[in-house]
């Protein structure tokens, strides 16, 4: 399997073998249910669709209810498709099978974490792009410590270039953090401990890819 769906539990830290304090993120990875298996003959490509997280049936669209019943499982919150899964799993994934963290990852693996970053609303250029502001309050400056400064030229080009870094809505984007090392695997609890930070708040969905 090329990946799994998880939920971010929170951050902690552990000590490595050489005594370093390593910041890490605890992720509840699975158990996920195989809700669809695609192949080249019927769909044009190989893929496995996994579902994770319980969902009330009254809040689930009827087409999805039938889709989950076909796989023999209850309605789920998150559905993700993993394309081109590894050859050694070909033929072993089947509809309704449960996939857990211990079956996909081992300690020492490197994974990519995909999530939605925290939304911060409308922010200025200092927070959004790391601008330094226009300096102190001397030389006639007044209430402009965190302002962007000049955004264009004079008579030419008589406009503001596209892509100019300005204030705007910040966060809430799909973010991918690559090469996070799997430090611990707890198969009984379906928990993974990965080094570094993972995008998103607590209890948000995270996609882990190998």
Image (cartoon, rainbow, N blue to C red):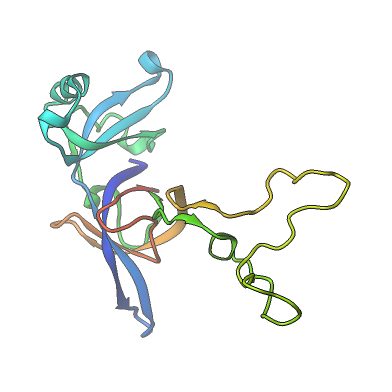
Relative to residue 69, is residue 37 drawn left or right? right
Figure check: 99 above or below 10: above
Q: Judge whether residue 112 can be spotted in this image.
A: no
Front one among 154 and 41: 154
Relative to residue 100, is residue 49 drawn left or right? right
Figure check: 99 above or below 145: above
- Where does the image place residue 204, in percent across and percent down from the top left? 29, 51
**Image quarter of residue 25:** bottom left
Q: Judge whether residue 38 can be spotted in this image.
A: yes
Q: Which residue is drawn at 63% across and 66% down?
A: 131
Front one among 170 and 40: 170
Residue occupying the far top of the picture: 42
Front one among 55 and 79: 55
Figure check: 186 above or below 14: above
Q: Residue at x 15, y 31 (%)?
A: 59
Relative to residue 39, is residue 147 drawn left or right? right
- Where does the image place residue 12, in percent across and percent down from the top left? 29, 72
Q: Residue at x 11, y 30 (%)?
A: 57
- Where does the image place residue 91, in percent across and percent down from the top left? 28, 29
**Image quarter of residue 19:** bottom left
């Amino acid at each position: 399997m090329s990946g799994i769906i998880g939920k971010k539990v929170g951050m902690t830290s552990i000590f490595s073998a050489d005594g370093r304090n390593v910041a890490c993120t605890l992720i509840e990875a699975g158990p996920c249910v195989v809700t669809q298996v695609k192949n080249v003959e019927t769909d044009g490509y190989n893929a496995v669709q996994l579902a994770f997280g319980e969902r009330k049936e009254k809040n689930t669209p009827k087409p999805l209810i039938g889709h989950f019943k076909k796989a023999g499982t209850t309605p789920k919150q998150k559905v993700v498709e993993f394309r081109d899964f590894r050859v050694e799993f070909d033929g072993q994934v089947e509809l309704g099978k449960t996939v857990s963290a211990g079956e996909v990852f081992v300690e020492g693996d490197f994974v990519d974490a995909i999530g939605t970053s925290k939304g911060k609303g409308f922010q200025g250029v200092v927070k959004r792009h790391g601008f330094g502001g226009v300096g102190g309050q001397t030389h006639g400056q007044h209430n402009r410590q965190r302002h962007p400064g000049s955004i264009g030229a004079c008579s030419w080009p008589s406009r503001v270039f596209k892509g100019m870094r300005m204030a705007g809505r910040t966060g809430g984007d799909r973010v991918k953090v690559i090469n996070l090392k799997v430090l611990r695997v707890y198969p009984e609890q379906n928990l993974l401990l990965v080094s570094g930070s993972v995008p998103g708040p607590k209890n948000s969905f995270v996609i882990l890819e190998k």
